[in-house]
Image: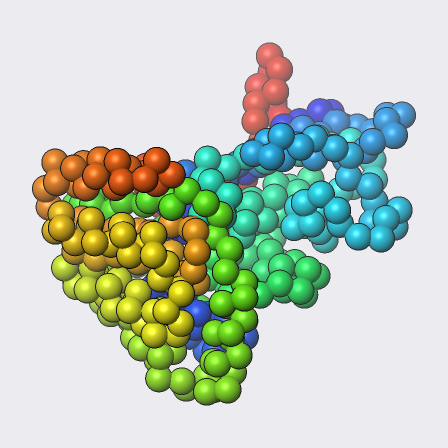
Amino acid sequence: MTRPCIINSVAPIRVCDNGGWTDTWFAEHGSIFNIGVYPFVEVQIEARPRGDEVDRIVLHAENFGDRYAVLPRSDRHEWIHHPLLEAAIDHVGVPDDLWVRISIYSEAPAGCSTGTSASVTVALIGALDKLSPGRMTPLEVAYAAHRIETEVLHQQSGIQDQLCAAYGGINYIEMFQYPYAAVSQIQVSNPVWWELERRLCLVFLGRSHSSSAVHERVIRNIREEGPEYHQLEVLRDCARASRDAVYAGDLVGLGAAMVRNTEAQRSLHPSLVSREAEQLIEIAREHGALGWKVNGAGGEGGSVTFLCGPSMSTKRAMVRDIEATNPLYQNIPIYLSRYGLRVWEAPLGSTGIGC
């Protein structure tokens, strides 16, 4: 690169992850349905030829108000501030002849249980990849993001969040042997797409998802039962039912699959459907919602996705009642994302030329 440039990347978050828990190493094989939605996570890289700057890589995590220099891996012993971001930068790398400033932002609240951390990693890897010759495919980006969480940082992570961030849209994911999977994007008519988009509702419970102790107990139980554990098969079946319902334009059927999936989560451990989530579900039931899904693995905090009935005014009344119940509860406007990871160079200067 011989001149400055700006690289932008965005990736969607995901909701309605029916079949979650089966996309893991301990489930071995799985079926997952999910939907990529806006709001995006956003990454912007300002790059220019390296001068005499001491701080060659500057990271700005806007949501946290953090701006700091990222030292080369050889100059430190561990990732300190934002391990996931710093590990991704180390994994992809920045060409030695560049100075870069990396800005990261998400409109989705931290700990929302909508796969935001995976979306951030996918968007960051995609943007960094554009600094060097050669391009990673969306699948390669997704698997790289997954390896960073599991192999580099030794965290528990299924595969669905990274795949949804990379591909977007409405997905049916068949994991035939962890972590390898086939992604089938579900194509529907515009009226079905628009109606599904109109009826979906995402509510944040007001605090970050935090249930690691419960999750560890669930993992131990599943390991003891094995990958053919009955409740895992129920979850897999919920994903298949969701796929079939969407293909048929059957939103009632999709709602039923969401409800069944949430009950299957509860059967893994009662705490996976929290008291706050129960409160929201009861309000939604009173307003005739067709379905509800506690997002992610479930537990304290996080969010719930609702599939409402046909009345727009009833949906708005439901949201008003939910937000009036607790000032922490927050409706997050969402729109279905037809695209997954997108990376492009921004026009720069009067010539309109990027890198």
Left or right of 178: which side holds 58?
right
Residue at coordinates 20% horizontally, 45% vertically from top-left?
199
Quarter containing the N terminus: top right
Along the line of sight, which residue is nearer the eye, 296 or 93? 296
Residue 193 relative to residue 61: left or right: left
- In the image, residue 26 sits, relative to residue 209, either above or below, namely below
Q: Position of residue 10 (x, y in %)?
A: 50, 39
Q: Is residue 156 visible?
A: yes
Residue 287: % across, % down: 13, 47
Residue sitting at x 68%, y 60%: 153
Foreground pick, 161 / 111? 111
Residue reaching furthest top?
350
Placement of the C terminus among the 4 image quadrants? top right
Closest to the observer, 167 or 13? 13
Residue at the location (58% across, 65% down)?
A: 156
Q: Residue at x 80, y 52 (%)?
A: 78
| Rendering coords of residue 29 (x, y %) | 46, 78
On screen, residue 41 above or below 239: above
Place residue 268 in its image quadrant. Answer: bottom left
